[in-house]
Image (spheres, rainbow, N blue to C red):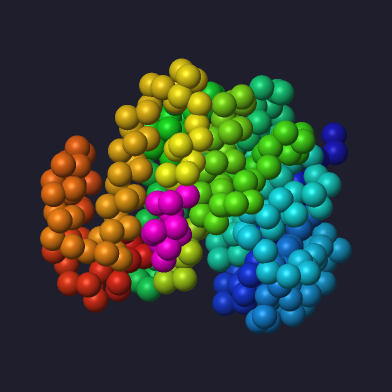
Amino acid sequence: MKKKLVSIIVNCYNGEKYLLKALNSVLKQKYQNFELVFVDNYSTDSSAKLFKSIKDPRFKYYKTQKKINLYEARNYALKKCKGDFIAFLDSDDWWDKNFLSSKKKFFNSNKDYGFTFSNCFHYFENSKKLKIFTKKKLPSGFILDNLLQYYFVKLSTIILKKKLIKSYKFNPKYNIIGDYDFIIKIAQNYKAISFQDSLTYIRIHAQNFSHNNRDMFYKEFKDWVSKQNYQNYYFKKNKDQILKQLEYLRLIALLLNHKSYKLIFGILKFPIGLLKFKLLIIYFLPNFIIKLKNKYF
C-alpha cells in the first residue's frame, strides 16, 4: 500500500541562522513521501538562497508579496498543501530522522482522530543543553480538558489530517497565541493521538518572539479568554484555571516591563504557590538580570 503524502509547512521570516538544520532534518526523514511547503514571509536575509540551494523537487518555495502576520502566513501555507496529512516545523527547530516514520499509528487511525502530537526536547541555544519538555505521560483521546488545565502541545510536533483545514484556520489577528487557539478549537471536536518519544527539538534563543513580547502575549490571551463559550462543559469546568493563567501572564508582563512596588501585592495574592515563588524571585532580581534571563522564564 502506498504511503500517504505528508505536507510539511515551514514558515520563515529572516531565518537564515538556523534554517539549514531544519531543512536537512526533513531531508533525512526515513519516511520519504512528503512535500515541503516553504513560505518565505518577505525575508530580507539569505533564507531564500539557502532554501533554493537544496535541489529536491519535493521542496516547494512560495514568497509573500509583503511581510504579513505569522498566522496569516500559516493560512497561506495551508492552501498550498496537497498531502493527506499536514505537519509543521518552525524554521529554528528540527526533527530526528524517525519523526515522521514513528507516526504510523496516526496515519492509519480512524476518522475520530484529527491530530497527533508528541513530547520534545528544548534546546537552549546559549548553554547548548537539552531538556526534555515533560516527564509526564501525555494524554490521548479527547484532550480538551487537559489542554485547558495546562497546554502541552508544541507546534513542531503536530501532524493533522488535511480534511480539518476545510473547517479550521489560524486566527490571523494573533501574533503569539494562534497555535494555541487553533489546537483548542480542533480539540473540541476531534481526538488526538499522543506519542511519548522526543523526536523534535525546540530551540530556545534570544530571538524567540513570544518571550520577547510579554505584553502582547498577555493582551492576546486576554482577548482569547473573553471570547470563549463558558457554557461548554470543559470551559466552564476550567474557567478558574484559565483565569489564573491570564493573571500569571499579566504579572509576568508587568514584572518584565513595568515593575512597581504595588506589584508585590498582586504577586502575594496569586494562588499557586510554586508560580508565586517564581514571580517573587523575578520581582527581586535586578532589571538587567531579568532582561538577560527573559528567554528562560
Decide if residue 250 is on the left or right side of residue 153: left
The residue located at (72%, 33%) in the rendering is 167
For the point 49% across and 41% down, which residue is it? 224
Q: Position of residue 4 (x, y in %)?
A: 80, 40
Percent x, y of residue 215: 39, 59
The answer to whether residue 113 is visible is yes
In this figure, what is the number of numbered marks? 0
Question: What residue appears at the point 20 percent right and 42 percent down from the top-left corner?
Answer: 270
Q: Which residues are magenta?
A: 210-220
Residue 259, position as x, y percentages in the image: 22, 64
Which residue is at a point 82% across and 72% down the rendered structure image?
Answer: 55
Quadrant of the rendering where the C terminus is positioned: bottom left
Image position, residue 185 (x, y; %): 58, 33
Between residue 157 and residue 75, name the one nearer to us. Answer: 75
| Membership of 154 in magenta stretch | no
**Side (left or right) of 222 relative to 83:** left
- Considering depth in this image, is 262 or 284 the residue closer to the camera? 262
Viewer-proximal residue among 234 and 260: 260
- Would residue 104 be visible to someone looking at this image? no
Q: Is residue 109 above or below residue 8?
A: above
Q: Is the N terminus in the top left, top right, bottom left or bottom right quadrant?
A: top right
The secondary structure making up most of the magenta span is: helix
Looking at the image, residue 138 sits to the left or right of residue 11; the answer is: left
Pick the front one: 66 or 75: 66
Vertical comparison of 292 with 276: above or below: below
